[in-house]
Image (spheres, rainbow, N blue to C red):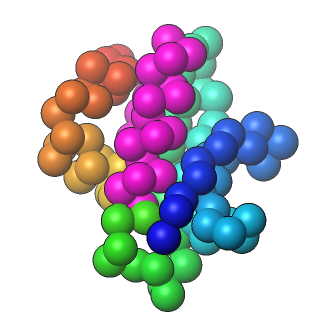
Amino acid sequence: MELTVVDAPERSRFEVSTDGRVIGFSAYHLIAEGVLALPHVEVEPAVEGRGVAGTLMRESLDMIRERKLRIVPICPFAQSFIERNPEYADLVHEG
């Protein structure tokens, strides 16, 4: 399954799609200058367990890093993803 992750700022979320169909998203909200809250990550039940959410998180966090932003991971999945992938820990906003 080929996945594409894009920022959809008009919907305040990163979206993951396959074959032109959105199958998941990671919502975000600007909570301070340069700081995004990540309150919710969701993928369609039919694609759970296939690495879709992990790809969504990895690529969205890479985009966040490129934009020199920080995050507050509120969603339990986002929190555990960062714990399992410490190379993203520097993105977590302290304070």
The x, y position of residue 55, in whole percent, is: 41, 53
Q: Nearer the viewer, residue 11 or 49?
A: 49
Q: Which residue is drawn at 43% across and 64% down?
A: 52
Question: Furthest-right residue in view?
Answer: 10
Q: Which of 76 and 81 is in front in this view?
A: 81
The x, y position of residue 80, in whole percent, is: 24, 52
Q: Which residue is drawn at 47% across and 52% down?
A: 56
- The picture quadrant where one finds residue 23 is bottom right
Tell me if residue 35 comes above or below residue 38 in the rendering: above
Q: Is the magenta stretch mostly helix, strand or loop?
A: helix
Tell me if residue 71 comes above or below residue 26 in the rendering: above
Q: Give the range drawn in magenta.
A: 53-73
Q: In the drawing, does residue 37 fall left or right of residue 49?
A: right
Number of numbered discs overlaid on the protein picture: 0
Q: Which residue is drawn at 64% across and 29% down?
A: 30
Tell me if residue 74 comes above or below residue 62 in the rendering: below
The x, y position of residue 63, in whole percent, is: 53, 28
